[in-house]
Amino acid sequence: MNSRKFSVMAALFLGLATSYGQSNLLNAKTPDEIGKKTAAEDSLDNDKPLPYGYIGNRDVLFSKKIWETIDLNQRINYPLYFPTEDSGSGGNLGSDRKSLFNVLIEAIQGGKLTEVYDDSYFTTKKTLQDIEKSFFFEEINDLGITIYNRNQGLKKYKGMNEDEIKADLRKNGVLTDEHFTTSRLKPSDIAAYQIVGTWYFDKRQGELKYRILGLSPMGVDAFTKARATAGEDVQPISLFWIFYPGARDVLHKAKAFNDKNSTASITFDHLLNARRFSAVVTKEENIYGDRGIDEYLQENAQMQLLEAERVRDKIRNYEQDMWNY
């Protein structure tokens, strides 16, 4: 390869690398210009998620659906967890630095992400109102109950139910925020993610592949968080399920932080599809109604981890066995 060809390829790769960083950072004259693309960049910007190839049923010799849990306490999974500021606030980091949870919530609230369901089988959709019930809980306290009891007998409240009376009292300033105990789910309350996907062997390409089907943030909902006593160990639950193929455009536009090189940031879609995370198998599809590992190996964490590795080995061994005669 001569020096001219080498220079062209180096410039190309350098351009690709810098395109993932913060746009116009080194050329901005004012802070407002940071992140804004030039006209030339806009004309060349056709960045979209890499489309999945079509897989015919006859091309699949083997497939197995697997459920896994991504623990956000592990350092390798930190790009999915941080930053923990509330959605839309950005703080001093700016609006382009968001956690995966904030990206999902903003897309749902903005109507860009509609494929939201209540379980990993994607049978029943959840509305924005259903999801927000898990994020915010409000309950009248003892002081508020005293004021409510004092006013509910008024003539104008005859025929109104309890919620209508409370709403009117709050509207008129009789009940204020100090008369209610509130609980709100924060991004920092997300402890893990559940992910479901399918491992399959493509006979045309002769290799084992993986495709994500769904993603679910796990945390303690606002109601449980409000009612939990101090020191009580409350287990996180799946708040909602995202049908992953319908969320790829949203996740591709959002960038995860790269601790090794902030210029070469990676999209959440690339991060998840490349499996740049650590996860533990919790369930595989099986004849027993897709029962989880913790259902037949109860109260034994070590055996559950060994069983999770056995499931992984079983899938990996299938690919190896394809080449043994």
Image: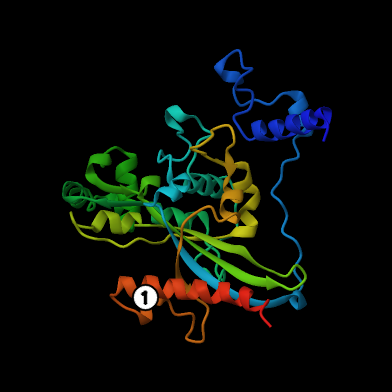
Is 219 placed left or right of 151 in the picture?
A: right
Residue at point 60%, 52% (across, down): 113
Q: Is residue 4 above or below residue 151?
A: above
Q: Depth check: 242 or 26 in front?
A: 26
Viewport quadrant of the C terminus: bottom right
Quadrant of residue 171 within the rendered picture: top left
Left or right side of 46 for 108 = left
Percent coordinates x, y for residue 297 in the rendering: 34, 79
- Residue closest to the far front: 2
Residue that extends furthest to the bottom in the rendered view of this protein: 287
Instruction: Tell me the residue at 39%/52% (across/down).
Output: 74
Q: Nearer the viewer, residue 160 or 287?
A: 287
Residue under label 1: 294
| Up-down relation of residue 130 to residue 263 (above or below) | below
Quarter containing the N terminus: top right
Residue 176: in sight, yes or no? no
Whether residue 129 is situated above or below residue 120 in the rendered picture: above
Name the image quarter holding residue 263: top right
Question: Left or right: 219 with respect to 274?
Answer: left
**Residue 116 percent across, percent down from the top left:** 55, 59
Instruction: Kindly tell me whether residue 249 is visible in this rendering.
Output: yes
Q: Please name whichever residue, 77 or 166, is drawn nearer the observer in this view of the structure.
A: 77
Residue 231, position as x, y percentages in the image: 18, 55
